[in-house]
Amino acid sequence: MALQDNGAEGRPDGTPEPYTTTAVAIAVADERGVITGWSEEARSLLGYAPGEAVSRPAADLLVSHLPPSALRRLAERAPWHGAVPVRHRDGRAVDMVVRACPCTDPGGRTQWVLTASVLDAPSLPEDKNTLLRELTLSQLPIAVAFYDRDNRAVGANDVIARIVGLPEERIRGRRLMDFLPSPAYDEFTELQDQVVRTGEPVHVVRYLRAPSESRGRAWSVFLSPLKNHLGQVQGSSVALLDITEQYLARQRLLLVNEAGNRIGSTLDVTRTAQELTDVVVPRLADYASVDLLEFIHHGEEPPDGPPRGPVTMHRTARQADTEALLATMLQLGSTVAYPASAPTAECLATGRSAVYEVNDSSMARWTAQDPERATRLLRSGAHSVMVVPMRARGVTLGSVFLGRTRHPEAFTQDDVLLAEEITARAAVCIDNARRYTRERITAMTLQRSLLPTTLPCQPAVEAASRYLPAGGRAGVGGDWFDVIPLSGARVALVVGDVVGHGVQASATMGRLRTAVRTLADIDLPPDELLTHLDDVVIRLSCEAAADADIAGDVGATCLYAVYDPVSRRCSLARAGHPPPVVVTPDGEAAFLDLPASPPLGLGGLPFEAREVELPEGSLLALYTDGLIEARGQEIDERLGALRRTLTRPAQALDTLCDDVLATLLPVPPDDDIALLVARTRALGAGQVATWSLPPEPVVVAQARKQVTDQLTAWGLDESAFVTELVVSELVTNAIRYGRPPIQLRLIHNGSLVCEVSDAGSTSPHLRRARSFDEGGRGLLLVAQFAWHWGTRHAAQGKTIWAELPLAA
């Protein structure tokens, strides 16, 4: 026991001490506190013989130190008394009342007379014992029971009796397992043994159903040791406090918190809906389903106002606490049509949650109109269902259906509030996912409209491509590629990269791709084309600087190559872009050493082109930097891996593209990637005919005859008339307006291309000739008969070309 300090001797008002004592032991101590006398009563109470006690400090016999107030009185040589635990000779503690009185011996030294007696339990008047035993215990508002060391009940109040459903006299003398044989209560028998063994109290919170009650409740259970005045455990007490309301409120808060952590982990509508059902089952309901309106999955705008009348939705998520119950539910992805009388349709129309019992009249009306779903509901065994509308930002998205089968209690208003809170959180996440889906569809539609869906069929190369947006993005970026047919059976290969990601980068990419196509149509050489494209990027940067909604400058890189299958030569230029890889037919791969030029948008710096010869069957790979740059990897290693992959044995180009991505991109990329692979073709001598013409008018007839003979050799006699007419007009214009030397060339490959070149720089143009004009009608005739026609300039001179259809 703790030391009790009662100050001076006795009480001034004469009231009795708060404890009673037995026989008195007497000891004497000197002013140092050393025992100098020891009575026989002291030996009887504490077990020490006089020889063992005398000359020993009195403090050695105390179990604990005296309180400061006692030490202060003793220092002042003032009387003191109090309850003190004293150590018996056998080691146990004996609670005693000790009185210390100072006196002076003949030599003037202070001596202390110590009297001590064993502390007995205080006695109460009989009427107070009756109050404690019969009134206080029975009227306690909490359940209380007492047990002996063998865990047999020695007493219990009326609350315990009501809980277990037995009168108090039938509880006494029995163990807990005797009148509560359920395994759920076995734990408390073990806890009672622990309390009796250790003497330490135990507190637990458990949710249990008492035998006399139909539903479970939460109990705060206190198990405490019962000790005698010597501190020895004689039994245990059990006190139960009903904390069901606090417990359920805490569980609701925990469930809401868990919903906030688990729902909305992705911007995926289906997964978010599934996360909602996973949270509420089985803690709130035994099964749950989420049905969403059709516009959400289609990425469309929501309709105005809540849905009225019959409603069609999609089963997006479902969950049940047993497989058998899950089997009774509609399959995911099913279309669900609810009549106007169905609880779900009424819930969506009113925007309010509702709880139904299976035998409600509203449920009966619904089951009459929808017997199939009524059968499913009956098969589930549900006795209480709840329908909660899913709304976010004023938009109705769908509904959540919850049912209870094994839960004995019906849904309460507190359950409705909890379900609405969780559903509201999920609704915001689903609406965010819906908006993201709509924006993603819009962005991807834009991306698809800006990138080539199929590569054009042309005679110069066989090509394949891949585009891969950065991982975690909306599916769009600023990388692009293109294959552009040019005059003379040539082809332009383009790969570019706009700085940044997202819709803004994609829109800029679209503008640059359009600009490249426009510049390619006028047959500019690669270095000149990049110079003009640099001006376009500078203008776009100026526009971006003037627009507060666009962040940062516009920057881009580009690689532009033109391949001629007749000469088998390729001209290339790059603007801050990685060099291409060339794999020759014998399997040797190398990066082309192109002149390094600055990225687009800097202005004022030149671009240089290089021309190389590519044997037929050579492989040309163009790519953006996202393919060769990755965090944590050396770029040289990735360049080597790219080169090795491209040199694998000949295979389909689509397969080769897939192999490149699989080798270099084991995980989603950090940057957008564009890859364009082309295998060169060559036009043989039998497909091309070339003549040098003197600048004399008489040569026009000769040119017509040469062309006719060539067409006959190619088996194209039926195309001779139109071709003669076009050749006549183009050669005449070259002689009249151009400068020698003049050259005529025919190219036969799927179509017929007629080209006339001269050293002049003047470009012809269409005009409408007046009635009495002697000229001006030649190019008009060429434009009428040709599929395409145009002019391309070289370092010296120009070429007028026309592509003619072949007769069937």
Image (tube, grey):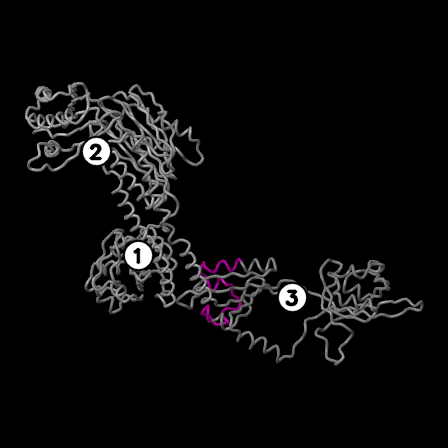
Nearer to us: label 3 or label 2: 2
Q: Does 171 lie within the magenta span? A: yes
Residue 769 in percent (x, y) is at 10, 36
How far is mark 3 from mark 1, CA to CA? 60 Å
Name the residue nearer the viewer: 353 or 148.
353
Name the residue nearer the viewer: 700 or 370.
700
Q: Secondary structure at mark 3?
A: loop
The answer to whether residue 523 shows anywhere in this view is yes
Residue 228 numbered tag: 3
How far is mark 3 from mark 2, CA to CA? 100 Å
The answer to whether residue 668 shows anywhere in this view is no
Residue 395 in percent (x, y) is at 30, 60
Q: Residue furthest right?
A: 107
Q: Which residues are magenta?
A: 162-190
Asked whether, in this view, residue 733 is left or right of residue 624, the answer is left
Q: Amino acid at mark 2?
A: Pro
How far is mark 2 from mark 1, CA to CA? 49 Å
Q: Residue at x 55, y 74 (%)?
A: 137
How dense is the environment of label 1, judged by Cα within 10 Å: few (below 14), some, or many (20 and up)? many
The main secondary structure of the magenta stretch is: helix
